[in-house]
Amino acid sequence: MESIQDVKRVSGGDINEAYLIETTKQSYFLKIHRHMKAHFFKKEAYGLNLLGKKVRTPMVYDVGQIKNDAYILMEAIESGPRNDALCGRALAQLHTDTQSYFGLSENNYLGTLPQSNGPDENWTSFYIHQRLNPLVKMAKEQGFWNRQREKLFGKFIDQFKNEDRAVTPRLLHGDLWSGNVMFTTQGEPVFIDPAVFYGDREMDLAMTKLFGGFSDAFYASYQKAFPLESGWEERVPAYQLYYLLAHLNLFGESYGGSVDRILRVCNG
């Protein structure tokens, strides 16, 4: 029987409370989302389990709800030195997981934003209708949209529809900024807080470049393990648009300028 020895509040990101729980047997990491149903963390647990077939993720011990608050209890990871070369190799390994369609068997979340994952065999259609359009609709409803932005977005959509690339549906982390990778004391990468689906692997790479934090060793290691198609860096802005639209909806017009700039880049 375990007995709790210590409980410390730690950083849980923008949306959750988080605690490190020390017991006589091991350490646990507890996240709590106030005024949320348990299904929110069930989606996270599902994503971690899916990623865990290819890369290291924290073990999930329990997901539930106490009164109006959801929680997820996980393995606590003792942090160690960052090893971007191992991280790049691990991401390449993750991207070897494929299926026949884009999307997922269930919907989930990007942060707290609902993320639709209905099956689609066409990547262009999936990205426009299940990634971009829902966030643009949400931005309009919240008053974070204007005529100029609509004009820029319409021009981008017209161009993106003409993309003629053969894209294989590959398992993505879905929200791969540097804060969503931890490292063990041996430098092994541990992927956390996913927004999984099967899509164009270039989306994960685009997110790594949006806020920085990944070194040249990360990209070199990835390329050695699983070379990207030529021109992938030119497509980065098109995929960063999704994440900037998400930030626009989460944090408001402070991200409006970034959305407009990336649309102008996309439109050449």
Image (cartoon, helix red, strand yellow):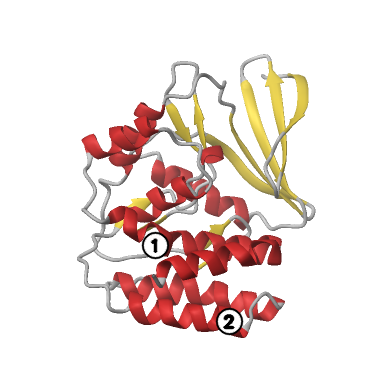
Looking at the picture, how far across and down is residue 157, in whole percent?
A: 40, 79
In this orientation, which residue lies closer to the viewer: 196 or 70? 196
- For mark 2, give the secondary structure: helix
On-image quarter of the C terminus: bottom left
- Check disc 2 and report the residue beneath it: 148
Residue 32 visible in this rendered orientation of the protein: yes
Q: Quadrant of residue 86?
A: top left
**Which x, y percent locates residue 257?**
62, 65
Q: Residue at x 53, y 46 (%)?
A: 211
Is residue 189 depicted above or below 12 in this figure?
above
Q: In which quadrant of the rendered image does the N terminus lie?
A: top right
Percent across and percent down for residue 12 are 69, 39
Q: Could you tell me the amino acid type at mark 1?
A: Leu
Against 52, residue 67 (above or below) is below
Read off the residue under disc 1: 104
Q: Amino acid at mark 2?
A: Gln
Residue at screen point 50% across, 16% down: 185
* Dots 2, 1 in contact, CB < 8 A: no
User: What residue is drawn where x is 43% and y is 48%?
Assistant: 173
In the displayed structure, 40 sits above or below 129; it is above
| Vertical position of residue 255 compared to residue 2: above or below | below
Q: Earlier in the sequence, mark 2 or mark 1?
A: 1
Along the viewing direction, whichever of 47 and 121 lies nearer the viewer? 121
Q: Position of residue 156 (x, y in %)?
A: 42, 76
Residue density around tag 2, few if under 14, some if 14–19, many if 20 or more, within 10 Å = few
Cα gap from disc 2 to disc 1, whole angstroms: 34 Å
Relative to 217, is 82 on the left or the right? Answer: right
